[in-house]
Amino acid sequence: MSIDTNKIKKVDCLDETCPVPLVETRKAIRKASPGDIIEVTGNHESSKIEIPMAVEALGLELLSIEEKNGNWIIRIKIPEEK
Amino acid sequence: MNKKLIYLDNSASSRLDERVLETMKPYYFDTYAVATSEFAYTLGILSREGLDEAREKIATKLGGSAEELVFTSGSTESSNLAIKGVVKAKQKEGNHLIVSKIDDFPVLNSAKFLEREGLKVTFLDVDKDGLIDLEQLKEAINKDTILVSIQHANQEIGTVQDIKAISEISKDKKILFHSDATHSFMRLPINVSKIPVDLVTISSHTIHGPRGIGALYIKKDTPIKKHIDGGFQENNMRAGVENIPGAVGFAKAVELVTEEENDYIKNMRDKLIEKILKEVPATDLNGHRSKRTPQNANITFHYVEGESITLHLDMNGIAVSTGSACFSRSLEASHVILGIGGDHEQAHGSVRFTFGRFNDMKEVDTVVKVISDVVKRLREISPLYKKEKE
């Protein structure tokens, strides 16, 4: 699947602890445009579980959770029609 | 995102009632002039009449007279005026003020400001339910005490102080008494003709009235100096063009609150407390069980943080507030929960639910169901909870 890189909105939450990554993710979701992909990077373990919980509650699509060198990257799809 | 919002933060601010808005509209579009005396144009006189009528209605509800009510921009300004105004007027007679440790910020921070200016301030302790000790109050009063300021009901835990007893103690010692009734006005009876209270702070925003309008009741002949200079509005007590649409809306909001509504709100609140304490393990009610405002429930969910609960409830369409202030990244715990003897864990896990006119019983069931699930899931990732289970 090819992704339009202009549609990726990056949120850097490295070294931030709970609940800051969730707060920043929510802010990015609120400001996103239809079709955007929110890409959150962090390393706080609880947030890795909390953010998908929020994605589920909001009825959004969780594209992936990737782990690399102790960091995680969560990708969330904003529907074409918000 | 499209879920119907369940709003349970009515003590922070409540949704305006449409009937209030309709009452206000003519004062924006028709009778929009500044309030004037009989010696000016008719539109200004009509504005004045609207303002006077609003003042009369609210003062009557409080048991006072119209001349004793000063409109302000809200409870923050009212409490500032009460405390700073009295201290300024009586500074030659004494330099001691008494407040409670769990009063709201307008009172606490006014007291702290005056303390930095040289005033002596006693911050009274409260018990585990949030009540002050009347004997401790009597002991704190000395020959230099000029004002006692104790809230009627607490903003976070809803505990209601015995302001009749407090006002009688103050009167007996010939000391002025101010009470911040922002969270009790119209939800609980308060009558200044029956209680010897000298100053009362009230606000519109918690009873489905407009924001930006409040009032301070000042008993006739109370020594007080204004702290906003300008014109001679509000009986020369508060300068600035009057917020007439706000005052008229405030009066309408007062008129719309009924005893039946307060019972309706209390029933929802009671059901919420009962169900949460029964269905969600490791929960505690904060504040007094019966001496509390009908709209307030404040519950600590142990092993989880209030901000996390608040965020997850929000994403499930439920608005509540927490005694924890991690959003500012300062991790400050609620001074109220700490004041009643709670530790940081209890303070950070506390959630406040405050009901209003537009809530219904079905919402209580939904909230309990969602919060049970959210708390359960948050505990699964809580290091505190894991430690407790080990």
Image (cartoon, coloured by chain):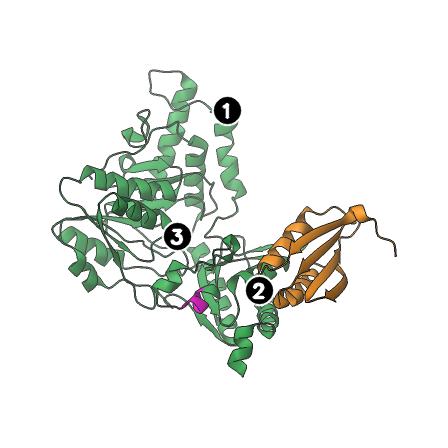
Q: Chain of mark 2?
A: B
Shade of chain A as shown in the rendered figure:
orange
Of discs 3 and 1, which sits in the foreground? 3
- Which comes before the other along the chain, label 2 or label 3? 3
Q: Is residue B248 visible?
A: yes
Q: Are marks 3 and 1 in contact (CB under 8 Å)?
A: no
Q: Which residues are magenta?
A: B342-347
Q: Chain of mark 1?
A: B
- Label 2 sits on a secondary structure element that is helix
Q: Are marks 2 and 3 in contact (CB under 8 Å)?
A: no
The quadrant where residue B54 appears: top left
Q: Which residue is mark 2?
A: B367
The green-coloured chain is labelled B
Residue at (73% x, 53% y) in the render: A38
Give a yes or no on whether discs 2 and 1 share a subunit. yes
Q: CA distance from mark 2 to mark 1?
A: 43 Å
Residue at the bottom extreme?
B390
Q: Quadrant of the N terminus of chain A?
A: bottom right
- Which comes before the other along the chain, label 3 or label 1? 1
Using the image, tell me which numbered label, if any, was put on residue B277.
none
Residue B345 on the magenta span:
yes
Give residue B71's position: percent from left, percent from top.
Answer: 35, 36
Q: What predominant SS class does the magenta segment belong to?
A: helix
Three-letter code, disc 2? Val
Residue at the front extreme?
A69
Q: Is residue B293 visible?
A: no
Give residue B248's position: percent from left, percent from top.
Answer: 43, 35
Using the image, tell me which numbered label, if any, was put on residue B30.
1
